[in-house]
Image (cartoon, grey):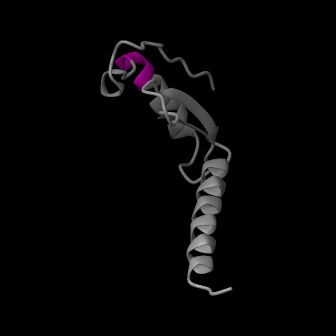
Amino acid sequence: MILVAACSMALPAWAQTPPTSHVAAATADSASQPSNDPDRMVCRYERPTGSKIPTKTCKTAGMWEYESQQSRKMVQDAQQRTGQTR
């Protein structure tokens, strides 16, 4: 699957939507893969800390889920440690 994205730094993130023809092509590609497939590619626009310029990050759905679980685990561990006395 080939993803095409226009790079426009002058437009806000909400205005950076792909043309309709790209949306139709992406929809057709995503329809061929089940939504619960951990190997499907998922792209997100994220703003790194200290920057106003969003960057596109693409990873598999399984990797996004793994990173989300690891983040939740780190927060839970930190919260449990703060309640303990030394």
Look at the picture and state if 65 lies above or below 32.
Answer: below
Please state, as top left, top right, bottom left or bottom right, where the C terminus lies in the image: bottom right
> Is residue 38 shown to the viewer in this render?
no
Q: Is residue 80 magenta?
A: no
* Between 81 and 39, the one nearer to me in the picture: 81
Question: In terms of image quadrants, where is residue 74?
Answer: bottom right
Q: Percent position (x, y) of residue 8? A: 42, 12
Look at the picture and state if 25 lies above or below 69.
Answer: above
Q: Is residue 20 magenta?
A: yes
* Between 55 and 58, the one nearer to me in the picture: 55
* Between 52 and 54, the one nearer to me in the picture: 52
The residue located at (63%, 26%) in the rendering is 1
Look at the picture and state if 2 lies above or below 67.
Answer: above
The residue located at (31%, 22%) in the rendering is 15
Q: Percent position (x, y) of residue 70? A: 65, 61
> Is residue 64 shown to the viewer in this render?
yes
* Between 28 and 19, the one nearer to me in the picture: 19
Image-based side of 1 in relation to 16, left or right: right
Look at the picture and state if 72 lies above or below 27.
Answer: below
Looking at the image, which residue sits at the far bottom?
Answer: 85
- Main SS, magenta region, reads helix
The residue located at (33%, 16%) in the rendering is 11
What span is in magenta? 19-23
Q: Percent position (x, y) of residue 77? A: 63, 73
Q: Percent position (x, y) of residue 12? A: 32, 22
The residue located at (36%, 23%) in the rendering is 17
Tag count: 0
